[in-house]
Image (spheres, rainbow, N blue to C red):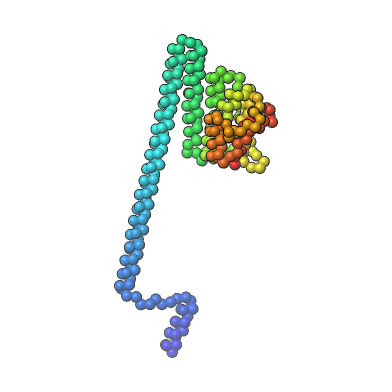
Amino acid sequence: MAFEQLQFLNSFTTSLGVRKEATRSVSSYEQELSERRGAETRLREALARDEALLREKDELIHNREVLNMEADHRLLNGLQMIVSLLSLQSRKEPSSDAAAHLSTAAHRVATLARVHRRLHTLDGQETVAFKPFLRELCSEYTSMLASEDRRKQSIVVEGCDARLPASTATPLSLIVNELITNAAKHGKGVITVRLEEQAEGGHLLSVCNEGPPLPEGFDPGASRGLGMKIVQALVEQIGGDFRIDRCEHCGGPRMAVAFA
């Protein structure tokens, strides 16, 4: 009877998925423990190497940030020195016309320094409320135009509010700089910077003012001007589309960038 009970118990435990482990020797346990200790040692060594690489990477990033800050600091100091020298020379210049030109140049360099500082406020930000940022940026350009005796040319910012990635906002700001400079040089009246949502998706950033129409068949890609080359490169950087047409609001030439 005991034998039959043992067979039944074995059958029952097997049906429940319980299997008796084969008898193991002490040496097999020792070998398995040694293998697991070896694996643990290798994992710890790999982890230590990865941590060392991460520390090295963090140090390189920190060093690069320090170098960038130092380069910016030297650039701003250099610009300030240029402003001081131009201002000093303008005060010593006997010719009133030459003094006015030197004073204008000093003011423009100072404005460029302020624009540079404002662009760096985007550092570390993932997204930017672009319209307020654009309005502040254009106030710097308005000051620059006033210093160049273009007091009748003001800049207004219109359109929608949008949060844009900082990686897009920075190139767009530089594009606006070039387009405003172009509009101030060749056009007249109020310069309008407009940010619009497109029906097909994405946005359109445009700069326009009253002025003579562009030459028929004008190709910005074939332009020899440095400004247009900079604009083309920046538009390509953000995967945008550069367009030239006439503004439906003021009737003047309009240069615009469509981007996602």
Q: Position of residue 14 (x, y in %)?
A: 46, 79
Quarter in which the C terminus is drawn = top right
Q: Residue at x 37, y 52 (%)?
A: 50
Q: Quadrant of residue 73?
A: top left
Q: Quadrant of residue 165?
A: top right
Residue 69 lies left or right of residue 144; in this view the side is left
From this viewpoint, which residue is outermost toward the bottom?
A: 1
Q: How many marks?
A: 0
Q: Quadrant of residue 43?
A: bottom left
**Residue 106 can be seen, yes or no:** yes
Q: Residue at x 48, y 14 (%)?
A: 99
Quarter in which the N terminus is drawn = bottom left
Q: Position of residue 188 (x, y in %)?
A: 63, 22
Residue 80 lies left or right of residue 231; in this view the side is left
Q: Position of residue 5 (x, y in %)?
A: 44, 86
Residue 34's place in the image compared with 81, above or below, is below
- The foreground one among 146 and 127 is 146
- The foreground one among 203 and 25 is 203
Q: Residue at x 55, y 39 (%)?
A: 236
Q: Residue at x 68, y 28 (%)?
A: 251
Residue 168's place in the image compared with 95, above or below, is below
Q: Position of residue 205 (x, y in %)?
A: 61, 34
Residue 2 lies left or right of residue 140; in this view the side is left
**Residue 176 can be seen, yes or no:** no
